[in-house]
Each structure stands twice: as structure tokens, then as C-alpha cells.
Image (cartoon, rainbow, N blue to C red):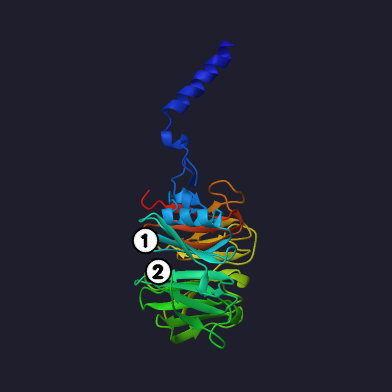
Amino acid sequence: MKNKTHIFLIIAAIIFILPARLYSAELVWPPPPEEAKIGFVQSFSAPEDLKIKKSIFKKIWEFIIGEDVENRIVKPYGIFAAKDEKIYITDSGSRRIHIFDLDKKKYSFIDRVRKDEFFTSPIGVAVDDKANVYVSDSVIGKVFVFDEKGKIKSEIGGKGILARPAGLAINPVNNYLYVVDTASNKIKVISLDGKPVSEFGQRGKKDGEFNFPTNIAIDKDGNIYVCDTLNFRVQIFNKDGKFIGKFGKVGNRIGEFSKPKGIAVDSEGHIYVADAMYDVVQVFNKNGELLLVFGGGGSENGKMWLPAGLYIDKNDKIYLADSYNNRVQVFKYLKGK
């Protein structure tokens, strides 16, 4: 009995003198004792999760119609976090764009192009410096442009222009909109007033060719990163569409891809790729070398189920569309730690 008590006291003493961060409830990757690089921040599925309450007018309207209007995320795909603390999420399940205004603590949504024309399959979303919102609908085959209040301004696409638009990104260097046109295996470059500028890519496996690309990210220098999904790789181009490099191959080991979807780049140029088949996010350096993996299948915080879109904001917050968990998860790159 004395020996057991002695062992217990030794273990208690060790726990007491070790750094508190080893026993913190913080969810980080890699786990202690290694230096943390990615930290879990929060997850949300509805306005209430972000402390956004229903307005008095909404409550009155729900009382009149006799039902509680549900604003929960169903199947998120694309994400954009704007400078004015607004988060835009395309939801192919509810066929709407959720807009969470964290600054004003308000929630709104866009579910139609016009009065009698609803979204069918909203996928990509991007916002320009004038707060215009660009949304791609892969089934309708167009990119729709809305003003800050959600009123339609214009549309881009139609027969011969876009076949099945998916990922969207605005290049900060030339201020052009880049559209991943999955069905045509091309990246279409379009001015913000809707005029075609250029395009690059075609079906194939060679450098600069694609096999059903899906998502896109652009770094602060204007370099373009494309998830070449069925070639199981990421391709990198300059702002003019000139091929720079590539990494990745098909496989079930870390550093390889099965169904790469979301892609984003942080402030230091690290490349994040969400793999929907393996329920992880893999982080690479500019040379395509694997640095870190986080996630894993499940529904707990930090776990994922068919992750889709990724977006990293100016503060290195990482937004992930956790599509089959019906939520968005927020992580953070712990720069300098």
C-alpha cells in the first residue's frame, strides 16, 4: 500500500511541475510537447453559435407565419471572410448564401437571383473591395454579382462562356476574377465588370492541363493555386496563367491525395489542401513538401466529414467548410509560436 501511495505522489508531482500548456484543453496541431502550429478556434452551424440573435422584425414575422425560420448551415462548400468581418458561405444543401456579420451581429442570406429564379447549386464565393459578392452556380452555369445588400447587379456566363463554374478568387495584383470552369477544364479570367480577359488550361495530364479542377486560391503576390482534382495534384501559375510548378499524386499516404477540394494560402505562403476522402487538411511549403496534417474523420471539434472549401483571412484564421458535419470550423495558423 505504501509503494502505491509513493508512486501516486511521484506522478502527481510530475504533473504539477510540468508546463501547464501540456495539460491545457487547447486543441492544437501538432500536439504537445511539439510546438503548436495550428489551433482550433470555434465551429458554428447557425447565427446563434456566433451570438447573433434574431431581430425583433424576424420574431414578429415568424409569429405571423406561425413557424420558426431555420437558418442553419446544411451543406457548406465555398467560404469567403471579408475585411469588414462578414463571413460568406455557399450552401448547396439549402441553396443559399449565408452571410454572418460579426461586427454588427446580424445574419442575412441570398437564396435567389431574382424574384422567381432561385439558386440551384451555389459553389464558389468571392467579394471585391467594393463589397460586391460573386457567386458561382455550377448547374445554372453562371457567376452572379450582387451588391452589398444582396441585390443582383449583373451575371457572367451563359452558353459558350462558362460550362460548370466552381471555385472563385479575385487576384489582388490585377483585380481580375478567376473562375474554375470544371467541365471545360479551364481557368477563365474575367474583369470585374464581366468582360472575358483570357483563359488557360485544357483536358489532360501535362503541366498546365487539368482533369476536372475544382477550387482555387491566390496569394498576395498574385500566384494562382488550383486543385486539379482528378489529376490528384495542385498546380501553381503566375497571374498570367504561366505554369510555375506542381505537387501531389494519387495515394493513401500523407502527402498524397484522393479527393483534394479546398485550397488556401496563409500569410507566409504555406499551402493548405482539404482532402474530402481522408477528412484531413494537409499543409505544404512552397516547394510542395508536406509540413503538417490536421483533422481526421469524426464530428468532434477539429474532426471533419467530407471537408470542402477553405479560406484564410488576413489574420491567418482558417475557415473550413465541414460539409457533412453541417458546419464551418475555424482554425488559426499560430504564426511566430
Relative to residue 169, is residue 158 drawn left or right? right
Residue 314 circle label? 1
Residue 123, percent from left and from top: 54, 69
Q: Amino acid at mark 2?
A: Lys
Q: Residue at x 58, y 78 (%)?
A: 140
**Circle 2 residues within 10 Å: few <14, some 14–19, many ≥20:** few
Q: Secondary structure at mark 1?
A: loop
Residue 39 sits above or below residue 24 on the image: below
Q: Tell me, yes or no, if residue 271 can be seen here.
A: no
Name the residue rendered at 53%, 19% in the picture. Answer: 8
The N terminus sits in image quarter = top right
Q: Earlier in the sequence, mark 1 or mark 2?
A: 2
Give the foreground label among 1 and 2.
Answer: 2
Residue hosting label 2 = 149
Outermost residue on the front side: it is 64
Is the C-beta separation of discs 1 and 2 under 8 Å? no
Q: Label for residue 191?
A: none
